[in-house]
Image: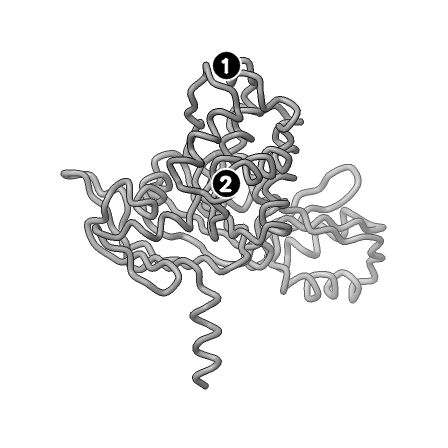
């Protein structure tokens, strides 16, 4: 039993317990609790003003909570705690560099300040990882937004952190830049074994790369858990292709299902667990079913939860 308890606590890299933050009369975060496990790509979602950036800044020690606890690797973070930051990297909003210096010069300066060992070797390593090694001696002011974002990630992983926090890393990027950013985040997680917390308004990005997520609104938690499990737990659109759409529509409406008829199929609002019962009603009525497709995107789920 002692071994099991140790393994469970070890799996939780970051724990937030009953965290609250108020600014005068404004409650930015209210009694928020969640946990991030080692190896997660953890999506942190919420509408504008939901309290996401405030929460991330509290984790990074940039602002202090009004109440609650932040626990990193089993140790509570306090106002005097700073050592834990050496194990966390962050890219909050747009990266800030000396634009008249090259990428190499910016990273070299940061490496000296962070007292990173084998600086030259490590700088070249991260520049290769983010695919900027061929432009390392170009001044940053000549970089595109995507290149600046990748340089920001290079700086965030330079000291080999256990956790990296990315706040809107794909903001302002074109579709190719967004795809490159997704690939880089997956590489950070799978090949570098760095746990990732990512806040993003590009919900398709979270859907493709995150294994767990948290949705907050007005500073409060709405949902937390596995991305796939959460999206399948509530009602979704199910497209059913049948031989007699009109009769099928009538049967399902009489059974209390919310349905609509399209040119090629019936769209039914249904929980995943209710799909067998719904299709059985059609089969029992002599309806031939050719295809059943679940249709839900993270964007649909997000709007449903936060509405």
Residue indicated by mark 1: 141
Examine the rendering and report whether any part of residue 243 can be seen.
yes
Residue indicated by mark 2: 158
The first of marks 2 and 1 along the sequence is 1
CA neighbours of label 1 inside 10 A, class few (<14), some (14 to 19), many (20+): some
CA neighbours of label 2 inside 10 A, class few (<14), some (14 to 19), many (20+): many
Examine the rendering and report whether any part of residue 234 can be seen.
no
Q: Is residue 61 left or right of residue 98?
A: left
Mark 1, secondary structure of its residue: helix
Identified at 39% across, 62% down, the residue is 73
Q: Mark 2 to mark 1: distance in Å?
A: 21 Å
Quadrant where the image shows the C terminus: top left
Q: How many marks?
A: 2
254 above or below 111?
below
173 above or below 18?
above
11, 208: nearer the viewer: 11
Identified at 48% across, 31% down, the residue is 107
**Snapshot quadrant of residue 262:** top right
Mark 2, secondary structure of its residue: loop
54, 141: nearer the viewer: 141
Picture coordinates of residue 253, whole percent (x, y): 64, 53
Picture coordinates of residue 306, whole percent (x, y): 43, 44
Q: Nearer the viewer, mark 2 or mark 1?
A: 2
| Residue found farthest to the bottom | 1
Q: Which mark is residue 114?
A: none
């Amino acid at each position: 039993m002692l071994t099991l308890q140790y393994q469970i606590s070890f799996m939780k890299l970051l724990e937030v317990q009953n965290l609250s933050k108020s600014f005068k009369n404004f409650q930015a975060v209210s009694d928020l609790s969640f946990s991030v496990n080692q190896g997660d790509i953890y999506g942190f979602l919420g509408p504008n003003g939901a309290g996401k950036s405030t929460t991330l800044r509290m984790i990074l020690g940039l602002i202090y909570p009004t109440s609650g606890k932040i626990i990193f690797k089993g140790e509570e973070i306090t106002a005097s705690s700073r050592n834990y930051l050496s194990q966390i990297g962050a890219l909050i909003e747009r990266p800030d560099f000396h634009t008249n210096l090259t990428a190499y010069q910016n990273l070299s300066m940061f490496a000296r300040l962070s007292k990173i060992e084998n600086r030259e070797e490590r700088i070249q390593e991260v520049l290769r990882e983010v695919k900027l090694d061929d432009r390392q001696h170009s001044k940053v002011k000549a970089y595109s937004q995507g290149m600046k974002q990748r340089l920001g990630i290079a700086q965030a992983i330079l000291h080999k952190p256990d956790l990296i926090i990315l706040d809107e890393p794909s903001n302002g990027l074109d579709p190719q830049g967004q795809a490159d950013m997704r690939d880089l985040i997956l590489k950070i997680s799978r090949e570098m074994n760095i746990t990732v917390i990512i806040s993003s308004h590009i919900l398709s990005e979270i859907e493709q790369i995150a294994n767990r997520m948290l949705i907050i609104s007005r500073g409060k938690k709405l949902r937390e858990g596995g991305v796939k499990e959460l999206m399948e737990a509530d009602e979704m659109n199910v497209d059913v292709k049948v031989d007699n759409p009109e009769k099928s529509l009538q049967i399902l409406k009489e059974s209390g299902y919310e349905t609509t008829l399209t040119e090629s199929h019936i769209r039914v609002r249904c929980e995943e667990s209710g799909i067998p019962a719904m299709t059985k009603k059609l089969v029992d009525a002599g309806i031939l079913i050719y295809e059943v497709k679940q249709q839900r995107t993270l964007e649909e789920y997000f709007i449903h939860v936060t509405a």
